[in-house]
Image: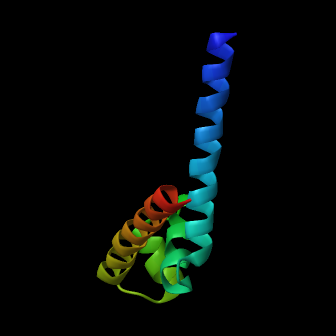
Amino acid sequence: MHNRLIALIKRKAALDSLDRLRQALVELPHRYREPLLLQVAHGYSSAQIGRRLGLRLEEVRDLLIHARTVLMRTAAHRGGSG
């Protein structure tokens, strides 16, 4: 019973984290969200993203770094306040 309770608590925490991450993704400005989704959800390389969006490779890399930073900060902030 104790192990099952611990497993349920861990699952709830994981789902809460996923919900925070999902909400942070929704709030991420399109400029950052689009390249991040192309990379994470569709497996595009930075070069492929650049070609698709008409951006230089350096721009794509900067956008991806910024997107991840903002996403994680927002999700972490939601965890502390929610």
Above or below residue 22? Residue 54 is: below
Task: Look at the image and tell me whether residue 42 can be seen.
Answer: no
Rendered location of residue 82, percent (x, y): 56, 59
Please state if 60 lies on the left or on the right of 37 as rendered: left
- Asked whether 59 or 80 is in front, the reply is 80
Residue for point 64% across, 56% down: 19
Residue for point 46% across, 57% down: 80
- Asked whether 51 or 37 is in front, the reply is 37
Please state if 45 lies on the left or on the right of 66 as rendered: right
Please state if 46 lies on the left or on the right of 9 as rendered: left
Rendered location of residue 2, percent (x, y): 63, 12
Residue for point 41% across, 70% down: 46
- Asked whether 51 or 34 is in front, the reply is 34
Farthest-out residue, bottom: 54
Rendered location of residue 18, percent (x, y): 60, 51
Task: Look at the image and tell me whether residue 82 can be seen.
Answer: yes
Q: Quadrant of the N terminus?
A: top right
Above or below residue 8? Residue 49 is: below
Farthest-out residue, top: 1
